[in-house]
Amino acid sequence: MAGPNLLAHVLVSKFADHLPLYRQSEIYAREGVELERSTLADWVGSASRLLEPLLGTLQQYVLGAEKLHADDTPVAVLAPGKGRTKTGRLWAYVRDERPMGSLQPPAVWFQYSPDRKGERPQEHLKQFTGILQADRYAGFEALYEQGRVVEAACWAHARRKFFELHQATKSPQALEALRRIGELYEIERHIRGRPPEERWRVRQEHAVPKLQALRGWMDDVLAATWSSLNLPGRFATRWAAGLRSSATRRTGGWRSITTRPSARSEP
C-alpha cells in the first residue's frame, strides 16, 4: 500500500512537473522498484476522489470573493486511438484580495473543459456575484449582461496591442499610449495594499483625470489612424471598465493577475 509521501510524489510529478505515469514507472524501474503504470493510475484516481471535498471547499472560497481574476489557456490532451493530441482549455479563477489591503489568503480554482465555448465560464461562474477582471473574451459577455457580474477589464490585454505595434513599427503614437497607460499603472503601484477608502480617494483624484485625458487623446489622435486594428473599440471597453474600477473601493489593480508576464512587457 502506498504511503502519503509516495502518493504526493506521484501526483506532483504528474500534475505539477508534467511527468507522465509511464515515465514515472520507468524511473522507478531503474531504481529496482516495479510499479506498473496501471497501479500508478489507480493511485491517481483514488487520490483524486479523496481530494474532491477539498476541491469543493476551494471552489466555495474562491467564488465567495467580491472580485475574481479569470483567464484560460490551451492545454494539449491525449486523444486515444488517434495518434495525436487535441486541444482542451484550462480555466483559472483567482481570488487575491491582498492589493485591497485584505488579510484573506489568495487562492486559485482551476477548471478543465474540452473546448472554449462561452458556456464554460458561464457554468463555472453561475453562482458568483461581484467584479470580474478578465480579457475581452466574448464568453464573459453573457455574465455581464445578467447584471450580477461587473466587468473590470484587464488593461494589459489592451496595452499589448500598443506594445506589439510599437515593437513592429516604432510608432510614436503607440509609445505615447504606452506612456499614458504606464501612468495609470504607477498610480496603482503606489496604492497597492492600502485601505479601500485611500485607494478610492487617490483614484478619484489622480486616475480618473488621466483616464479622461487618455480617452480624449485616443479620440483625437488615434481613431482614424488605427481604426483597422480596432484599437479604439478595444480601448473604449477598457476606458469604461477603468472608470468603474476607479469608482469602486473593491478593485485591486488595472490588470488581471492571471495575465502572463509577456502581456506586461515594457518597450
Image (cartoon, rainbow, N blue to C red):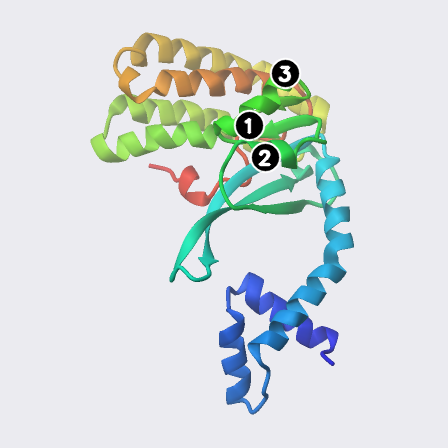
Whether 237 is drawn above or below 109: the answer is above
Whether 140 is drawn above or below 218: the answer is below
Q: Which mark is residue 247?
A: 3
Question: Depth check: 107 or 81 in front?
Answer: 81
Q: Which marked residue is nearer to the observer: mark 3 or mark 2?
A: 2
Q: Secondary structure at mark 2?
A: helix
The amino acid at mark 3 is: Ala
Mark 3 vs mark 2, CA separation in Å: 26 Å
Q: Which marked residue is nearer to the observer: mark 1 or mark 3?
A: 1
Residue 35 percent across, percent down from the top left? 59, 82
Return the residue at label 2: 121
Q: Residue furthest left?
A: 169
Residue 127 percent across, percent down from the top left? 72, 31
Residue 22 percent across, percent down from the top left? 50, 75
Q: Which mark is residue 234?
A: none
The amino acid at mark 2 is: Pro
Whether 42 is drawn above or below 114: the answer is below
Identify the image quadrant of the N terminus: bottom right
233 horizontally vs 59: left or right:
left
Quarter residue 191 falls in:
top right
Identify the image quadrant of the C terminus: top left
Q: Are marks 2 and 1 in contact (CB under 8 Å)?
A: yes
